[in-house]
Image: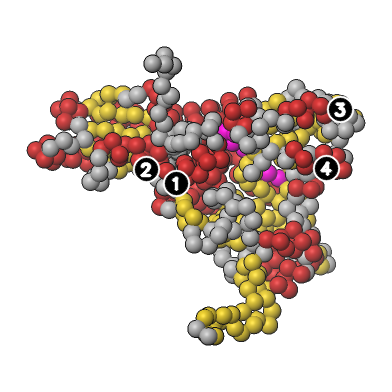
């Protein structure tokens, strides 16, 4: 008989170390977040996943309105002629566009076939700069109409060739903000302000540390003058672009004729911005916080922050336990955390108690409370924190637990952020100075760098766009030019030329 210790049993197989890509798929399913639909590349977002997305929407929507934006809605279908007015924009999206060419079906030999060709093809919305810009051209007449600050929550379609649940799908949900301004300074201030809104949201709500910076020219949004992004590190060391904000200059206003009468009576073109985040943030939560037992959802996003499981072994004790659980739930719900009532529920499903508990562990509920007859008699609670699963259960006085709930949730939220930040800092390499060192680093196993320890490389780059071809064989890109530059003279890690600019290199989703 072997003396080797048995491998630790986990709720999710394979583990991250065994197969990170499959681990991700299994977590999405086990946490009941999303599943494939009958259309290739499209997904069904299930109640647990959508509940988290609703929490994201609520928080972001508040932030948008606090910064002066109003919600509106624009059509799903955009005439092809709108895109043809902005050449760079349409080129950037041409290969991803879904096109509607007919407006009805007819039966031919017992089969339904398209009929009624449209006079002009319609594009299923990949993004809305052109359709919103066309509307702005009608709404804006004078400097008094500026700034115009709108946002829409919508779905978009981009024909993804290599789909992955939540991360890259043909159809996904997002918000897209669009604004028009008198001057460059006003528009640039808006683009940077919304970029910082995303940073604060990611760090405060998603518990996701990010690197803030500007995209290089080859990575900009099609048609933009400047693109700013927040880049997050996943547990396999890859980057995920978690939000972007763009200064579009006068490119769209000139192509769509969005003019206004300035303060001197002359006509000028407005300066525009756009910015957005999407349901890929659900995938980011999985990959940044999940473990081999499932999801870990930050309390500020959890649909249910405290789940109470009655442990009933016979009918005689059931009423007393259920009454205790409901009273506990009410007491918790009367408390507040992050400005809202604590979201607590009693799980009274008729399934085994162990199955209930592990269902909520896999879904990532921050706190699971089990209440049995001894807890009722002793006026106690049995509590387990999802972020400290290995530390086991705590037995607390009921009143003390209720009084401490806000602090406990805040501690979990901050602890998740701190753990993710430490992970990112430990996997951000700043000591690589030469191309040989760079290639050696990125020669590590690209399929499962959760094991290899791969992450971000922060190094000098000369700005030579031709040098980026050296990155293609490694599957590496420049994620952003971080705002926190030291300006020191150095050597470009790709070419050996003099360079002062730091950039973040990584493989990415």
Residue 215, horizontal then vertical, whole percent: 75, 44
For label 3, the SS is strand
Q: Residues within 10 Å of mark 1 (few under 14, many from 20)?
A: some
Q: Which residues are magenta?
A: 228-236
Give the alpha-carbon distance from disc 4 to disc 2, as whole Å.
47 Å
Give the alpha-carbon distance from disc 3 to disc 2, as whole Å.
51 Å
* Disc on res. 491: 3
Q: Are marks 1 and 4 in contact (CB under 8 Å)?
A: no
Name the residue carrying label 4.
Answer: 469
* Disc on res. 29: 1
Residue 459, horizontal then vertical, whole percent: 78, 29
For label 1, the SS is helix
- Residue 204 is left or right of residue 430, and the answer is left
For label 4, the SS is helix
Q: Are marks 4 and 3 in contact (CB under 8 Å)?
A: no
Identified at 66% across, 32% down, the residue is: 445
First in residue order: circle 4 vs circle 2: 2
Q: Is residue 400 or residue 53 the one in the foreground? A: 53
Mark 2 or mark 1, whichever is nearer to me: 1
Q: Residues within 10 Å of mark 4 (few under 14, many from 20)?
A: few
In the rendered image, the quadrant that contains the N terminus is top left
In this rendering, is residue 472 above or below 461? below
Name the residue carrying label 2.
Answer: 304
Residue 24, horizontal then vertical, whole percent: 52, 41
Give the alpha-carbon distance from disc 1 to disc 4, as whole Å.
37 Å
């Amino acid at each position: 008989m072997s003396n080797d210790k048995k491998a630790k049993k986990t709720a999710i197989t394979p583990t991250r170390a065994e197969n990170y890509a499959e681990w991700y798929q299994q977590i999405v399913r086990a946490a009941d977040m999303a599943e494939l639909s009958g259309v290739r590349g499209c997904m069904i977002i299930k109640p647990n996943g959508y509940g988290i997305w609703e929490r994201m929407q609520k928080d972001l929507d508040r932030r948008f309105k606090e910064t002066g934006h109003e919600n509106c809605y624009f059509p799903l279908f955009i005439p092809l002629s709108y895109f043809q007015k902005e050449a760079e924009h349409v080129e950037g999206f041409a290969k991803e566009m879904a096109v509607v060419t007919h407006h009805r079906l007819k039966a031919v030999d017992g089969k339904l076939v398209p009929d009624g060709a449209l006079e002009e093809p319609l594009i299923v919305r990949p993004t809305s700069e052109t359709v919103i810009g066309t509307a702005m051209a009608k709404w804006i007449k004078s400097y008094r109409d500026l700034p115009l600050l709108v946002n829409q929550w919508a779905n978009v379609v981009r024909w993804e060739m290599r789909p992955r649940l939540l991360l890259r799908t043909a159809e996904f949900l997002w918000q897209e903000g669009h604004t028009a301004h008198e001057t460059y300074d006003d528009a640039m201030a808006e683009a940077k302000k919304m970029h910082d809104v995303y940073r604060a949201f990611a760090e405060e709500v998603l518990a996701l540390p990010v690197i803030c910076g500007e995209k290089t020219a080859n990575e900009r949004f099609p048609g933009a003058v400047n693109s700013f992004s927040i880049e997050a590190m996943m547990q396999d060391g890859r980057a995920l672009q978690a939000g972007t904000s763009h200064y579009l200059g006068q490119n769209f206003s000139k192509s769509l004729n969005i003019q206004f009468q300035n303060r001197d009576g002359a006509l000028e073109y407005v300066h525009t911005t756009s910015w957005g985040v999407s349901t890929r943030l659900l995938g980011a939560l999985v990959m940044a916080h999940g473990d081999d037992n499932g999801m870990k959802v930050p309390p500020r996003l959890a649909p249910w922050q405290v789940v109470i499981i009655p442990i009933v072994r016979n009918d005689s004790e059931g009423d007393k336990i259920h009454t205790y659980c409901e009273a506990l739930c009410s007491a918790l719900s009367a408390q507040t955390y992050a400005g809202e009532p604590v979201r607590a529920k009693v799980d009274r499903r008729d399934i085994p108690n162990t199955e209930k508990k592990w269902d909520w562990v896999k879904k990532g509920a921050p706190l699971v409370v089990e209440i049995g007859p001894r807890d009722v008699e002793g006026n106690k609670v049995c509590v387990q924190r999802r972020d400290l699963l290995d530390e086991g259960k705590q037995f607390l006085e009921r009143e003390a637990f209720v009084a401490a709930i806000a602090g406990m949730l805040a501690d979990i939220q901050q602890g998740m952020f701190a753990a993710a930040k430490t992970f990112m800092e430990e996997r951000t390499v700043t000591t690589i100075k030469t191309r040989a060192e760079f290639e050696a680093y990125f020669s590590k196993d690209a399929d499962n760098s959760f094991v290899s320890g791969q992450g971000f490389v922060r190094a000098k780059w000369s700005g030579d766009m031709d040098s980026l071809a050296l990155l293609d064989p490694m599957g590496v890109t420049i994620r952003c030019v971080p705002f926190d530059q030291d300006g020191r003279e150095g050597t470009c890690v790709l070419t050996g030329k003099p360079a002062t600019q730091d950039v973040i290199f990584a493989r990415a989703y």
